[in-house]
Image: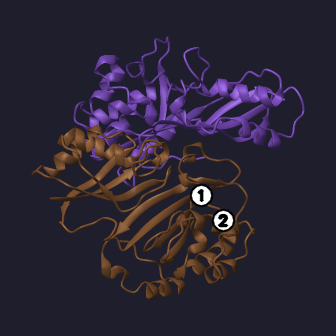
Chain colours: A brown, B purple
Amino acid sequence: MNIKLILTYDGTHYFGWQKTKTGPSVQESLEKALFQILRTPVLTEAASRTDRGVHARGQVVSFVLEEERDLSLLQYNLNSVLPSDIRILSLEETADSFHPTLDAVGKEYRYSICLGPVFDPFQRQYAWHVHQPLDLEAMQAAALAFIGTHDFSSFTTEDVEESTRTLFDVKIAVLPENQLEIRLYGDRFLYKMARRIVGTLVEIGQGKIPVGQVGTLFEKPNRSTAGMTAPAHGLFLHQVFYTANIFLNPLELALESVNGFRFRRF
Amino acid sequence: MNIKLILTYDGTHYFGWQKTKTGPSVQESLEKALFQILRTPVLTEAASRTDRGVHARGQVVSFVLEEERDLSLLQYNLNSVLPSDIRILSLEETADSFHPTLDAVGKEYRYSICLGPVFDPFQRQYAWHVHQPLDLEAMQAAALAFIGTHDFSSFTTEDVEESTRTLFDVKIAVLPENQLEIRLYGDRFLYKMARRIVGTLVEIGQGKIPVGQVGTLFEKPNRSTAGMTAPAHGLFLHQVFYTANIFLNPLELALESVNGFRFRRF
């Protein structure tokens, strides 16, 4: 049977989701735990190949389970052998046809920024410290300019044939204790796209890049005039969406957002 | 001149505040940073000798500065050379007579508990995971029984002549996402007292210890029938109080709290 699980992990000590020869990966740790409990090699697929140092609260993973098992006991046993920085939040049977990457219709990434002169030691592995004050109004205006269907080739380091993507919404949440959270809702993200959008928003907030630059970068793609890539350790894969009709009309949703409607959380 | 600073630190990698030959300490790191910037050995005093693995959000430290300095620049320079898990939140001149331990009239400790079957990986170094459900009503009743002036010798591993202490208030805050926070406000805490009170409250919540036991333990001290010592990594020294008149009548304050008043935060 096909199993879908929701995974949360602190990415600090991992070289990203995907197995690699250069260092420990979340996938390798999960597959080791599966082998330890099931006594047979298991291959896993994930919705997002999170980069080195990136965290996840709602990574979606699937694998095929060959024999019948008590699924709640399986989740418990896997959590008992996984390292304490990786945990399975849920584990359930799903349709045989389910594929976490191909079936995903959208993802939400959240990026944490710690403002002010002193970087809270408890945030040092989970936020980007920006000590200069930011122009939040300029950032809000730029966030709106990102929403919609555009050619995002200025905001990736990947060479892909088709770089048109849709951002359903970009929210800048001002949280207590000098925290800022940038929430990005999109269909498919290019390599480093979330971090380059955040870097551009921050440089707009610092007055280094004018707000109008965002539209120009969509019309005349140019990687060198886009903003910097924000550091990996502030980024969280927050959730993955699979309900197709929620995103049936992304531009209409985007317009709703422009007109001040709050994006619905699911 | 006498300098008072407020320090926050992630205690995970330290053998507590105090210098020791067995491993790295917060005091040693701070004194190293002071030597690096001031080029002269400096001795520091702290309000609380936090144990190995215990964190602080508001540790108060003092030291004598021999020469005139720009204090805001000094704070900035010290933060630049301190390890990223220790930060100075404020640094100011104070009365020559000020002593962070002797002048303290009270302290607030906070203890974080993560409930539910799965331990959030982002909390693994900052909370105690208790997966069995807890009887919160029993814990609330027991919390009230702790408030007041009592012989706390059952709740320490230290042998002291005088073990009478006052707890001004004990709050159990139910936070979002299965988090519980126990806030202890007291005059002076005995060795391991905060963690043993938390351990006792949790064992009362688990039904292992009856609520009435708390009163009995004050009347007939007995360390073996008190609860366990909660793990160090859930404990935070939250703040230290120096304004004497706030605690002028602790029992009256305690009674206010019993009658449902919320303890004032400063």
Mark 2–mark 1 Cα distance, whole angstroms, equals 9 Å
* Among the 4 quarters of the image, the one containing residue A64: bottom left
Relative horizontal placement of residue B169, taking residue B61 as reference (left or right): left
The picture places residue A168, in percent across and down from the top left corner, at: 47, 78
Q: Provide the residue designation for mark 1.
A: A113
In the structure shown, which secondary structural element does the residue marked by tag 2 occupy?
helix
Residue B154 makes an appearance in the image = yes
Q: Which amino acid does label 1 sit on?
A: Ile
Residue at image position (30%, 24%) is B216
Residue at image position (44%, 30%) is B232
How would you rate the neighbour count of disc 1 (Cα within 10 Å): few for under 14, some for 14-19, many for 20 or more? many
Residue at image position (44%, 88%) is A252
Foreground pick, A242 / B114: A242
Badges 2 and 1: C-beta atoms under 8 Å apart? yes
Outermost residue on the right side: it is: B68
The picture places residue A233, in percent across and down from the top left corner, at: 54, 51
Relative horizontal placement of residue A198, taking residue A103 as reference (left or right): right
Image: A164 above or below B182: below
How would you rate the neighbour count of disc 2 (Cα within 10 Å): few for under 14, some for 14-19, many for 20 or more? many
Q: Which of marks 2 and 1 is in front?
A: 2
Image: A256 above or below A228: below
In the structure shown, which secondary structural element does the residue marked by tag 1 occupy?
strand
Q: Provide the residue designation for mark 2.
A: A202
* Among the 4 quarters of the image, the one containing residue A76: top left
The picture places residue A204, in percent across and down from the top left corner, at: 69, 70
The picture places residue A60, in percent across and down from the top left corner, at: 33, 60
